[in-house]
Image (cartoon, rainbow, N blue to C red):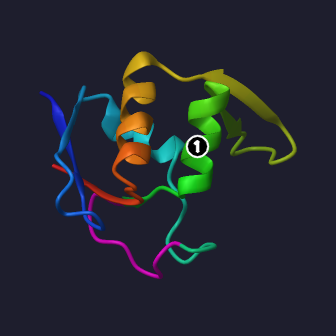
Amino acid sequence: MAVRVISIDQPAAPSCAMPDRFRHDVTYFATPAGVQDAPAELGEREYWIRAEEARQAFDDGVITIVSPLDSSYRTEIEISEDQERWLEWLLQHNVQHVRLV
């Protein structure tokens, strides 16, 4: 089953189709509610993706993952082609607030 990513902050942007596994992948890019410029509350299946971080991941081709057991341990993971396509969609349409449907 495919996932559609809908822009909340740019409603004129077309949706972006992603594979089902993206339901998990999106969390790698999301800023928690109330952190930095993310809204204090996000709805169910809504995520805030900071434009600066999306640009950094797109330009570098990697994301940094922090260990849930030891925050001093970080590793870089190469983004997939689907993730790259999604980041390009975010940047092209100036999207930061999304919902998965």
For disc 1, the marked residue is 55
Q: Where is residue 26 in the image (x, y as percent from the top left)?
A: 42, 42
36 sits left or right of 18 in the view? right
Q: Is residue 100 rendered to the left or right of residue 39?
A: left
Instruction: Give me the residue at 33% from left, 50% from top.
Output: 93
Query: On the image, which quarter does residue 22 sit in?
Result: top left
Viewer-closest of 73 and 61: 61
Q: Is residue 29 above or below residue 10?
A: above
Image location (x, y in percent) of residue 35 = 61, 73
Q: Residues in magenta?
A: 38-46
Task: Examine the rendered structure and indicate whether residue 67 appears above or below residue 40.
Answer: above
Q: Which residue lies at the image location 67% right of the left edge and 28% below the top edge? A: 60
Within 10 Å of the Cα at label 1, are there few (<14), some (14-19), or many (20+) other Cα atoms? Answer: some
Label 1: element kind: helix
- Which residue sits furthest front? 92
Quarter occupied by the N terminus: top left
Q: Residue 98 appears at what percent x and percent y?
A: 31, 57
Q: Main secondary structure of the magenta part?
A: loop
Q: Which amino acid does label 1 sit on?
A: Arg
Which residue is at a point 69% across and 45% down the rendered structure image?
A: 68
Is residue 66 toward the left or the right of residue 38 in the image? right
Across and down, in percent, residue 27 comes to 47, 46
Between 12 and 73, the one nearer to me in the picture: 12
* Residue 88 drawn above or below residue 8: above
Residue at the image position 72 percent from the left and 27 percent from the top: 76
**Is 97 rendered above or below residue 80?**
below
Q: Residue furthest right?
A: 72
Residue 42 part of the magenta-drawn span: yes
Left or right: 32, with 82 as reference point: right
- Residue 43 in which image quadrant: bottom left
From this viewpoint, which residue is outermost toward the bottom? Answer: 40
